[in-house]
Amino acid sequence: MKENIKNIPTYSVKQLLTTNIEIDKVVCIKGWVRNKRDSKAGISFLSVTDGSYFIPIQVVAENTLSNYTTEILSITKDCSVVVVGRVVKSLGKNQSIEIIANTVDVIGFVENPDTYPVSQKRHTVEYLREVGHLRVRTNLISSVVRVRNTVCFAIHEYLNNNGFYWIHTPIITATDAEGAGEMFRVTSLDLNHLPKNQEGQINFKKDFFGKESFLTVSGQLNLEAYCLAMSKVYTFGPTFRAENSNTTRHLAEFWMVEPEIAFANLMDNAALAEDLIRYVAKMVLDKNLEDIKFFDEFVSNGVLLRLENLATQKFAMLTYTEAIDKLLHSNKQFANPVSWGIDLSSEHERWLCEEYTKTTTIVVDYPKDIKAFYMRLNDDGKTVSAMDILAPGIGEIVGGSAREERYDMLLKRMHEMNMSSEHLYWYLDLRKFGSVPHAGFGIGLERLVSYITGVQNIRDVIPFPRASGLINF
RNA sequence: GCCUCAAUAGCUCAGUUGGUUAGAGCGACGGACUGUUAAUCCGCAGGUCCCAGGUUCGAAUCCUGGUUGAGGCGCCA
């Protein structure tokens, strides 16, 4: 690389294409060649991307460059380059500006381009999962990553703007009954020489924490403790479930944002969830329109309109009882029979939001017997103040509830469900010392990103997916 | 965990009723083209037909087992 490059300002591709860079300015860009087109008359067009923006910058390399025949003609997809050149109005159709190169330095060539896994062609998502370390070099995954970033940023921004404190709830927990599925065990014991107690069982007193410990399935219970002092709080981090789920919408490691609000009921809760999701949708439209247009054209037709609707339209809302009634009168044959008291299955949820309301739908007030112990009992004595938000094409993206803040009611419910209150004494304490009605929910980050982008399989909206048998990268 | 389907070139796929030397597109490579946009056109190379058995004169094709992947269901976010 030439010495004088150090004095030339480096711009990201996004800066070049979205701000008014003055014509004839000499700039430096650093990135990877996504595509190269040659004219043997002595001109090559390099589409260079650095990940900052969906659209690449076009670099025009002429055969007067000293390394034109020795290096530039040999460039293949994803060679890394440092380009110094002059910004000019483009003569081509698809971009406003381009760069006439003074120098193109190839920093790293691609070995064996004939077998390079992410060659210059379209690939299936299934194949790309097999090359998880390289798949971000596609339009699909890089766009997903940019949108995912915006979604996370929007969530933090919305909650901070509305007075929420971000609480870092623990990843490792001793609470083995959070009620959300199988847990991964955390241990520092030597698995080949497990300590045993007198009954011949594993002696977890010898383990790192002195008792059994696990990866968290939800930060909710810890978060409630902070809610009942800080009023508006949220946790946002990875959660872990050891369920052997084999679907397009489950991961063993996924990210969840869980707000919790004090002095609030289920309707406050639903309003917050809806407003938050709408804010996220608006910001994605604002910051990632090029990415969304790509999804709309190549991944899922109509996803742009769906996102615009998500950003502007009210969600539908109906009670569980109403939902059951609509399902019973739908004239559709369901594989799982419908009656009051059943848990809604995927086909029921899909019918409700895809056929009946045709939009994002909040279902509230579920039967108590199909919901978690901490959900607040309604006055009817048979339903709880629970809510699910259903998204067309995905199903449940949010689950939440008002929490049972009445000590006696909570204890009674735990006994009914044969739960030991011993480990959760601290959770019960919260109902004894200044308890207030409070509510919260969890949004599955990946499900939200999947809904926004139209990318069908949840494994493609997280950088390195973790699922049963899937941990190669 | 249950059910269904699939596996053929670097990738995406075709391959008829079990029958000679397994095909195409894309990618890669070589050539043509004075500005391309998933460039276009011409040419060339590229195969353990997932693995192990079995049936058969003969298996990419049929059978059994396994491996890997996908979709649906359940669990949920």
Image (cartoon, rainbow, N blue to C red):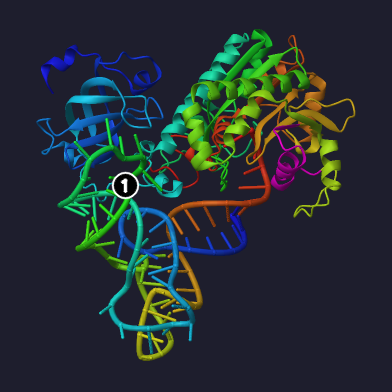
Q: Can you tell which quarter of the image residue A388 is in?
A: top right
Which quadrant holds the C terminus of chain A? top left
Q: Is residue A149 above or below residue A360?
A: above
User: Which contiguous range is marked in magenta?
Assistant: A342-362
In percent of width and height, residue A161 lies at 59, 9
State whether residue A169 appears in this view.
no
Residue in front for this viewpoint, A115 or B13: B13
Q: Number of callouts in the render?
A: 1
**Residue occupied by mark 1:** A117
Which quadrant holds the N terminus of chain A? top left
Q: Is residue A349 magenta?
A: yes
Helix, strand or loop at label 1? It is loop
Q: Is residue A67 magenta?
A: no
Q: Can you tell which quarter of the image residue A51 is in?
A: top left
Q: Can you tell which quarter of the image residue A401 is in?
A: top right
Q: Is residue A405 above or below residue A468?
A: above
Residue A62 placement, left or right of A238: left
Q: Residue at x 39, y 15 (%)?
A: A19
In percent of width and height, residue B48 lies at 30, 67
What amino acid is at disc 1? Answer: Pro
Q: Residue at x 20, y 34 (%)?
A: A108
Circle 1 residues within 10 Å: few <14, some 14–19, many ≥20: some
